Image (spheres, coloured by chain):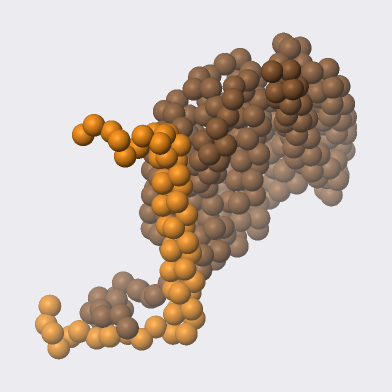
Amino acid sequence: MAVDKLETITPTEAQLKARRNRNIAIGVALALFVILVYVASIVRLGPAILNRSM
Amino acid sequence: MALLEKDSYEASGFQLSEATASDYLALLKPRVMSLVVFTAFVGMLAAPVPLNPMTAITAIISIAIGAGASGALNMWYDADIDAVMTRTSTRPIPAGKVKPGEALAFGLVLSALSVLTLGVFVNWIAGGLLAFTIFFYAVIYTMWLKRWTPQNIVIGGAAGSFPPMIGWAAATGNISLESVILFLIIFLWTPPHFWALALFKSGDYERAGIPMMPNVAGEESTRKQIFAYALLVAIVGVLPWYFGFASAAYGLVAVLLGAGFVWYSWQVLRMSPDDRKMKPAKALFGYSLLYLFGLFAAYLADSIVERAMTAAGA
């Protein structure tokens, strides 16, 4: 891959807007998933979650 | 700014995506998902065991995401036929908003996450049933039955019938007669529901090459089969009361709703072959949705009253 053949492309306004929209959705979904796993772990393992033998 | 080799992206027709979150949400078939969530919730609440609210929420979210994932896999595989049917031509892939590969990856990742979450945090009977449901819908129905046999939605209907069973399994950790009856209600309801649609959308299915019952066996045979299934679903709908799983109030609602289903199907059976407007078929399609929602809502109300009475007596 020759360096001089490399080109950059500039996203259009619509593409940037759509990407930002997707990024926000991924961020929100990820945050909700982390909360779900955290709370479900507490419920599943109980208050002794940090007091388990390794 | 994206760094790419110009020759390669031009040759491959590469372009940056303009898909938004709502396009990905549409891949999850939100309307189907809402019915799945509702029936799974009924199955869960009907189970005679105490429910941890957080476990219930985790189960419902997992089942909803799993159902959505199977919808995305269905849209990935069926993009070619979706494009030629008026009802489905605006879906994200035929509309050019989401690429097939993106939908496939989205569906696979969500399938894995939903099954793992349900298995790890609720139980593996429910997780296993969810995995089987996704497999059944995406592979057995979508890839195999749908384009092969007019019994496609009869057998494939099992996929849509599992959610109350998964809900029940999430609550109890097992499968029992109660959950099998809830499964059977949806299983027997599916053929008259879809064949009513197929009657007035037969042109769509014919263009797409899908062997739906009206296109293969003819309208008359389809109308007879719709009526037969309507009789069966009306009977099975009453079984929860017959076996003592639900109250007489539920039984009464089931009898009335079932009688309505049979009546609407009778109208379809009597429909003239020259009737191209097919109002009775459209009416049956609308009523079938009302029937399923009404029956499960009655079961839900019954379960809530039962739980309240048990709590008051305890």
- Residue B123 locus on image (x, y percent): 44, 29
Chain letter tied to orange: A
Q: Depth check: give the residue in front, A27 or B314.
A: B314
- Residue B169 locus on image (x, y percent): 52, 25
Q: In this view, does B193 lie above or below B252?
A: below
- For the point 45% across and 37% down, the residue is A43
- Residue B135 locus on image (x, y percent): 44, 36
In this rendering, would B93 be left or right of B275?
A: left
Chain letter tied to brown: B
Q: Residue A39 occupies which quadrant of the picture?
A: top left
Q: Depth check: give the residue in front, B135 or A16.
A: A16
In this rendering, would A45 be left or right of B72?
A: left
- Residue B173 locus on image (x, y percent): 49, 22
Q: Depth check: give the residue in front, B218 or B264.
A: B264
Q: Is residue B215 visible?
A: no
- For the point 86% across and 30% down, the residue is B260
Q: Is residue B87 above or below residue B307?
A: below
Q: Is residue B42 visible?
A: yes
Task: Single out the residue that lies furthest toward the bottom.
Answer: A4
Quadrant, the N terminus of chain B: bottom left
